[in-house]
Amino acid sequence: MVVKCEEVWREISSYLDGDVSPDMRAAIDAHVSGCKHCTAVLDGTRNVVQLYGDERMLEVPLGFSHRLHRRLEGNMPGSRRSFLGWMVAAAAGVVLVGGFEAARSSSGPRNLRSEHAQPGARVPPDMMVLVTSEGKTFHVAGCTFIHDKAHVRTMVAREAEREGYAPCVRCLKKYLS
Amino acid sequence: MENPVADEEMLIQRIREGERDLFYELIQPYERRMYAAAFALLRNQADAEDVAQEAALKAFKHIGQFRAEARFSTWLIQITVNEARMWRRKGHAHMMEPIANHEDKDNEGNYTPRDFADWREIPSETLERHEVRQKLAEALGSLGQIYREVFVLRDMQQLSIEETAKALGISNASVKTRLLRARLMLRDLLAPGLGGSWSSRLSFEKGTKPW
């Protein structure tokens, strides 16, 4: 299959999401490798998805959480736990997660994060995938097996594999040998 | 911690049985996403905050109607999107649509990229800089409503195509078309040489010449 620039642009979004047929993927790869314009469009679009997919882009105004909880508290009849109590619980959670992160970051070389996981085979290296800091697998967006949705990061599959993540057994089953 | 989905189901069950305080715990991981969804539709901080609060209250009141076949996070976002739309209909929103020439009509025609400058990878550490986040937010804010809402739900909130379609009440095909255009428009807006000089200026500041 041979594709033109226009077809590459039309398929670029699905290509990045891993949602094109193997034939189409191969045709796009072949085209892009010899086309400067399409390389620029593909790299830039991948950059866009990666940057906006970062949780740092989900900024909230200062004090947002505090005000939300106050509002809830004022509207929940019979609420027993005080707002202060909630703040203490939330702060404890942050400390707990922080400790976890520190322990993980000193865990040495990046083999697979789970001894039970299977490494992937022929995962398209540029496919956009999602990982969570405490997870062991990478996923495509929308997979119901993504647990800690609040701490998700977007990256290319190559990067996820380098960090020791393995393909999800549900959404990326086809890449498990 | 071992199985957050099961934990969430248990929390929901306990809230339904009367442990109302647990609702804080339940929605806390999703607060930022609710705000972001509201902001994507309303583009005004104060409105988005009001709507996120309304949506949280509504979710609390209707927790009995939540069905476990959907994800709780998706259900929350759906409520937020509905609240934001109602807010707009009531004329609360301080909106100025549309900005620039990114028309809101669903254009099924192909999108032709306008800029082919090579865009070197921008490392995600760059996002530590407020200026960069600001530029990205501005570019997103200049997209037409229909593109912005699809992009935010799919690429920032990581909903699937189907979940995005359901939350917005549109077809999967429309989600895909709008997502493609949104991604390509953002690339054009941010690529060097077309409203994107900020990225080369940043590398220049770091000591790399942008030429």
Image (cartoon, coloured by chain):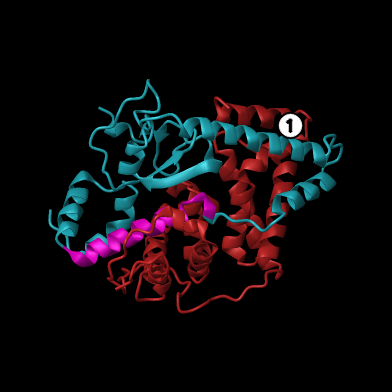
Chain colours: A cyan, B red
Residue B83 part of the magenta segment: no
- Left or right for A85, reference B122: right
Residue B92 seen in the current view: yes
B148 vs A119: above or below: below
Dominant secondary-structure state across the stretch colored magenta? helix
User: Was residue A52 drawn as part of the magenta stretch in this picture?
Assistant: yes
Q: Is residue B163 above or below residue B174?
A: above
In the image, farthest residue toward the bottom: B101
Depth check: give the residue in front, B129 or B17. Answer: B129
The residue lying at 34 percent from left, 43 percent from top is A159
Look at the image and give the residue range highlighted in magenta. Answer: A35-56
Nearer to me, B24 or A143: B24
| Rendered image quadrant of residue B117 | bottom left
Q: Is residue B197 above or below residue B31?
A: below
The local secondary structure at tag 1 comes to helix
Residue A88 rendering spot, x and y as whole percentages: 75, 37
The residue at which mark 1 appears reads as B16
At 76% from the left edge and 52% from the top edge, which residue is drawn?
A67
Residue A119 drawn above or below residue B191: above
- Tag 1: residue type? Arg
> Outermost residue toward the front?
B207
Pick the residue in front: A96 or A65. A96
> Can residue B168 be seen from the camera position used here?
no
Residue that appears at 34% across and 76% down: B193
- Residue B98 drawn at (x, y percent): 53, 76
Q: Is residue B35 left or right of residue A136?
A: right
The quarter in which the C terminus of chain B is drawn is bottom left
